[in-house]
Amino acid sequence: MKTRYLVLEDGTVFKGEAFGSEQASIGETVFTTGMTGYQEAISNPSGFGQILVMTYPLIGNTGINRDDYESIELAINGIVVREYSDEPSNFRSTMTLGDLLTLKGIPGIQGIDTRKLTRLLREKGPLKGKLTAAGEELDVVVANREIEAYEVPVNQVGAMSTKKAYSSPGQGKRVVVIDYGLKHGLLRELNKRDFDVIVVPYNTSTEAILALVPDGILLSNGPGNPEDVEGASHTIKHLVGKAPIFGIGLGHQLLAMSYGAKIQKMKYGHSGGNYPVKDLTTGRTELTSQSHSYVLEESSIASTPLSVTHRALNDGTVEGICNDADRVFSVQFHPEASSGPHDASHLFDRFANLIYSSTRKENFYA
């Protein structure tokens, strides 16, 4: 393999071996803790523009299969692993991870100390970084200049959202999904419950959404800062009360903002599987899949009619909210998993029960 370097904005340099695309790339370097599910992680739209550091040491050993994508196109700008396996052993595998990255023009680097890198990112937070072209001699001055000039994209949702509405037909009630960069796992869970699903672009107007006569509205996950999604909170505010609303990930943050709550950036975010979250309404603790860099500012929720329903046990951050009167609820984590634990998939059943409930103000947590 050819030599490749990872150069970070703080001046740290890691030397390793290139795999995937031979081209160079710049992005925001973040880590994810999942022991499995690297295919889902690299195809998660919430990873837009990131150089993804896999903390699990062996990546690529199960190859790539046709079923486990969370989006058709990959949104990441690079991948960093301790050890890459180019000889996968899995009956579903159709290509290697390196072949997929080459096909999509995404560079990878292996053979570096990912534990050291992760500790650095935990200390300093996400850092802009550059993966050099395969075999390229390192010019630190040039690399640092390019990293300094790089600006993290602002309109990430606009880049990942569908450009046209489309349907995933079912025989049940109609759910309109506002696509802020949704994972396919959301659609799979809705399809399991036979909802008639219509997915619309993130900037679809309130009037256009209501014209579809939704029985329920799902606000999807997505990448980036929710404050950059222009008009989203305004649209959601005018949808509240028209139909039951379920928000996930970025959708959860935008729903809270529509009520006047505020968002703050986390030091290094949550990314990976097995994050313990307590459901305060039941007392049950569930393991969850997560991918977010922003979180609700809890003090700002007190002035809204929202109630906190879920809390992260690792750091105490807010992971879920609801307002029974308006028939809305949301969670910060991914109840569809993909990959990760399926402990919280029952939230889609709660959404279904809320939609099919004949009593408008029924407490759907009962």
Image: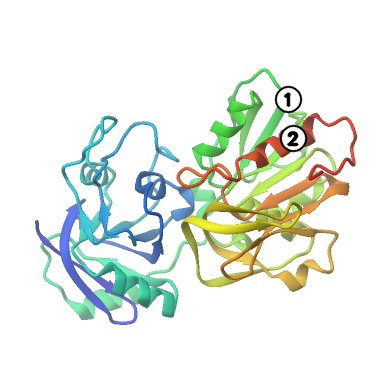
| Relative side of 287 to 257, left or right | left
Instruction: Give the distance between the C-alpha atoms of the residues marked 1 and 2, in whole angstroms.
Output: 8 Å
Q: Nearer the viewer, residue 248 or 241?
A: 248
Residue drawn at point x = 52 percent, y = 55 percent = 290
- Give the colouring mode of the picture: rainbow
Residue under the point 56% across and 59% down = 276
The answer to whether residue 311 of the structure is visible from this angle is yes
Q: Are marks 1 and 2 in contact (CB under 8 Å)?
A: yes
- Provide the secondary structure element on which disc 1 rests: loop
Q: Is residue 146 visible?
A: no
The residue sitting at the top extreme is: 171
Q: How many marks?
A: 2
Asked if 98 appears above or below 26 in the picture, the reply is above
From the top left corner, tell me how far across and down residue 282 is, in percent: 74, 51
Q: Which residue is mark 1?
A: 173
Dot label at residue 216: 2
Q: Position of residue 222 (x, y in %)?
A: 55, 51
Answer above or below: position of 149 versus 338.
below
Quadrant of the frame with the C terminus? top right
- Residue 131 is situated, as x and y percent measured from the top left of the image, at 25, 64
Instruction: Give the left or right position of residue 118, taking residue 260 as reference.
Output: left
Q: Quadrant of the N terminus?
A: bottom left
**Mark seen at residue 191:** none
Is 20 or 318 nearer to us in this picture? 318
**Relative height, residue 292 to residue 182 (above, below):** below
